[in-house]
Structures are given as C-alpha cells and as structure tokens.
Image (spheres, rainbow, N blue to C red):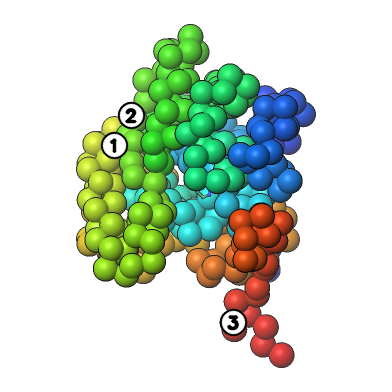
Amino acid sequence: MSHVFDPGPVGEPYASLIAAYPGTDVYPADSFRVEWGPIFHRGRLDGTARLLVIGQDPAQSEAVVRRILVGEAGHRTQGLMGKLGFDRSYVLINTFLYSVYGQTGGDQHKDDPGIVAYRNQWLDAVFGANQIEAVLALGSLADDAWQKWKQTPVGQGYSPGYQHVTHPTEPESSSAGDPAKLAAAITAMLQNWNQALEALHPLITQPDTPGPLVPYGDAFAPDELIEIPEFDVPAGLPEWMRSPAAWAQRVGSTAAAKRADITITVPAGVITS
Ligand code: URA
C-alpha cells in the first residue's frame, strides 16, 4: 500500500515565515498555551489552493498532529468544504497560532499588533501564491482577522467570495452539555452554513468535484463529517488520528492541570490482538 503525506511548510514563502514565528513576546503565556508550540496550517502550500478557511485556534488534537482543524471542528469543516466542491484544493490557517487559554484570551488579544502582523504575512503569502476564489471565516475572531487583513494595502487588492459562518464547535460551547440545546444549536448553525453555501457555491469556477449544492438538514448526516485526508497530515500519522473519534482529551481537575496534560487514547477496535 502506497502512502501519501503532507511535507509541511518546506517551500517559500512559508519556510521563511516559519523561521520567524512569534513566541511569548507576542503571544502571552497567560492567555495562550504556548508550551504546546505554534500550529500553522492544513492543506495545500504548493500554489493549488482555491479555497481559504480561517479558523480560530488549535485544540488538543491539533497539538498532537501539528496540523490545524483535524479534530471535531475539522471533520465538520472538511464536510463544509466538500459542499463547495473542494476535497483537496484548500488551505486552512487559524486566527491564532497557539491555543487560547481562558475564556477571554482571544477577544483580549485580537488587536495585538504582533499577532495581527504575523497572521497578515501568512495571508499575503497565501494570496500571493494561489488563485483563491473563496474565503470562509469560522467564527467572529476569524471574521475579525479577515477584516483586518482586508484593510491592508495587499488585502485591498483581492476580492474573493467571502462568508463568515458560525464556528463549527459553537453548538458545544453554547449548550453546556444540554442535549436539547446542543441539537437546536446544531440546527441553527447548519442553517447559517446553508446561507453561506448558497452565496459562495455559484462563485466557485474551479471546484475539485463539480456538482449541485446539497444543503444540510437539521443535523449532520454521517457523510457530512469527513475524515481528514492522509495527504493533509505528516508522514506516518496513525490512521485513527484522522478519524472523528475523540482520541485526545485535556485531563485534570483544574484548568492548570488540564493545560499540562493531553491524554491520547487509541480508539476501541484499533488494537486487535
Ligand atoms: N481547531 C483549530 O485548529 N481551529 C479551530 O478553529 C477549532 C479547532
């Protein structure tokens, strides 16, 4: 069996951006989980991306895989990109390089000049190296990131289709473990996503897989949660780390303990002997 993998940001202009990534001087350690390192992207860095997705910040699965949007939010996003006809020609970056720590860390630091300037360099690089047809911002911090870049001289030179959608794990955040609230919040999110898809789908001229727009129903159908492709992840990553199973958890009885501990559990059925 032949395997494919993503070599990561090895070529320019990305390699130089990686060489100069910001640390605690720009991302304060009381608001970001800097100890888990920066996580930069997922998807094509070879000039073939036509869809850009801006996420928020990496969670625990991303800290292990070293690619963004590979956990629950990532599987939902993979399905959303698929609805626009993209199963390969995309690139995803986050608003923040490091995982946000605490409830207000993101809002508190969204205007920090060093954070904005470094992210804008990535956006300059992505637009300079690709023919981006459409941009999806996941959540209000990603929308803010996009609006900030659009005000820059480089950003003013591009006008792709753009939609700001509800963040893929907003239903979990807003429902606080209440199953009825969660179901209602998922329905509301999918309605929001359908509106964005209706606006963007007609603008896509070169999808990977052309076809009519198939809107979401009231809940995710099984084939709307799509496994992270092998060609998006580093060489040799176990297959189950690309599955929707919740294999990485922050563990501990306090926020500080959870910050220090990501427990990885091989999903049931993977070990067979
Ligand atoms: N993981 C990410 O990398 N980004 C998000 O926005 C959510 C989860």
**Residue occupying image coordinates x 64% and y 65%:** 252
Q: Residue 27, image x and y in percent?
A: 66, 32
Looking at the image, which residue is at 71% across and 48% down? 36
Give the residue drawn at x 39%, y 36%.
Answer: 140
For the residues labelled 3 and 1, say whether their Cβ atoms are less than 8 Å apart. no
Q: Is residue 48 above or below residue 116?
A: below
Q: In terms of sequence position, does the residue under pointer 1 or pointer 2 come before the other?
A: 2
Instruction: Name above or below for residue 253 compared with residue 208.
Output: below
Q: Quadrant of the N terminus?
A: bottom right
Q: CA distance from mark 1 to mark 2?
A: 6 Å
In the rendered image, the quadrant that contains the C terminus is bottom right
**Residue 268 bears which disc, if any?**
3
Label 1 amino acid? Leu
Q: Amino acid at mark 2?
A: Gly
Crowd class of label 2 (few under 14; some 14 to 19; many from 20; radius 10 Å)? some
Mark 3 or mark 1: which comes first in sequence? 1
Q: Is residue 75 above or below residue 33?
A: below
Q: Nearer the viewer, residue 40 or 13?
A: 40
The residue nearer to you, when weighing 220 against 114, is 114
- Helix, strand or loop at label 3? It is loop
- Of the numbered discs in the image, which one, if any, rests on residue 200? 1
Q: Residues within 10 Å of mark 1 (few under 14, many from 20)?
A: some
Q: Quadrant of residue 181?
A: bottom left
Q: Residue furthest bottom?
A: 273
- The local secondary structure at tag 1 comes to helix
- Give the image location of residue 164, x and y in percent: 34, 36
Residue designated by label 2: 161
Q: Name the N-terminal-most of marks 3 and 2.
A: 2
Q: In the image, residue 10 lies at what x, y percent?
A: 73, 36
- Label 2 CB sits under 8 Å from any ligand 1 atom: no
3 vs 1, front mark: 3
